[in-house]
Image (cartoon, rainbow, N blue to C red):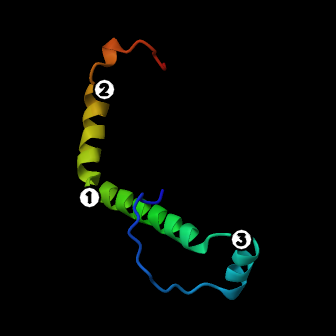
Amino acid sequence: MPQATSEKQRTNVTLTAANLAAARELGLNVSAISDAALAEAVRKAKAKAWAEENAGAIAERRAWIEAHGAPLDDLQVLKTE
C-alpha cells in the first residue's frame, strides 16, 4: 500500500513500449501504479529480511511449543482436535 505523503521525487524508469502504450490507452496512472508496486516489493523484502533475521528465535519458540505445548493451551475453549 502506498505511503500517504505528498512528498514526491522524480525518477526515471524504463518500461516496455507496449506496456506503456497500453497503460496510456487505458488511462492508467503509471506513476501511481509504479509507486504502489514498489511499496509492495519493499514491504515483502522487509518481511523476508525480518523472517531471516529472526529465524533462529522462531525455530526455538516452535521447538519449545512442540516440547511443552502452547502456553494456556489447557484454557483454550475451542479445541481443534
CA–CA distance in space, label 2 to label 1:
23 Å
**Frontmost residue, 5 versus 69:** 5
Numbered label attached to residue 36: none
Q: Eyeballing the image, is 80 above or below 37?
A: above
CA–CA distance in space, label 2 to label 3:
52 Å
Answer with mark 2 or mark 3, whichever residue precedes in sequence: 3
| x, y percent for residue 60 | 24, 43
| x, y percent for residue 51 | 33, 55
**Frontmost residue, 61 versus 41:** 41
| x, y percent for residue 28 | 67, 69
Neighbour tally class for label 1: few under 14, some 14-19, many 20 plus, Cα within 10 Å: few
Residue at coordinates 29% horizontally, 32% vertically from top-left? 65
Pair 2/1: label in front: 1
Determine which residue is flagged by label 2.
Answer: 70
Residue at coordinates 52% horizontally, 66% vertically from top-left? 37
Q: Eyeballing the image, is 76 above or below 67?
A: above
Q: Are marks 1 and 3 in contact (CB under 8 Å)?
A: no
Residue type for callout 3 = Gly
CA–CA distance in space, label 1 to label 3:
42 Å
Neighbour tally class for label 3: few under 14, some 14-19, many 20 plus, Cα within 10 Å: few
Determine which residue is flagged by label 1.
Answer: 53
**Frontmost residue, 44 versus 59:** 44
Residue type for callout 2 = Ala
Residue at coordinates 68% horizontally, 87% vertically from top-left? 17
| x, y percent for residue 69 | 30, 25
Of helix, strand and loop, which one carries label 3? loop
Determine which residue is flagged by label 3.
Answer: 27
Name the image quarter holding residue 7.
bottom left
Residue type for callout 1 = Glu
Indicate left or right for 16 with 42 as reference: right
Of helix, strand and loop, which one carries label 2? loop
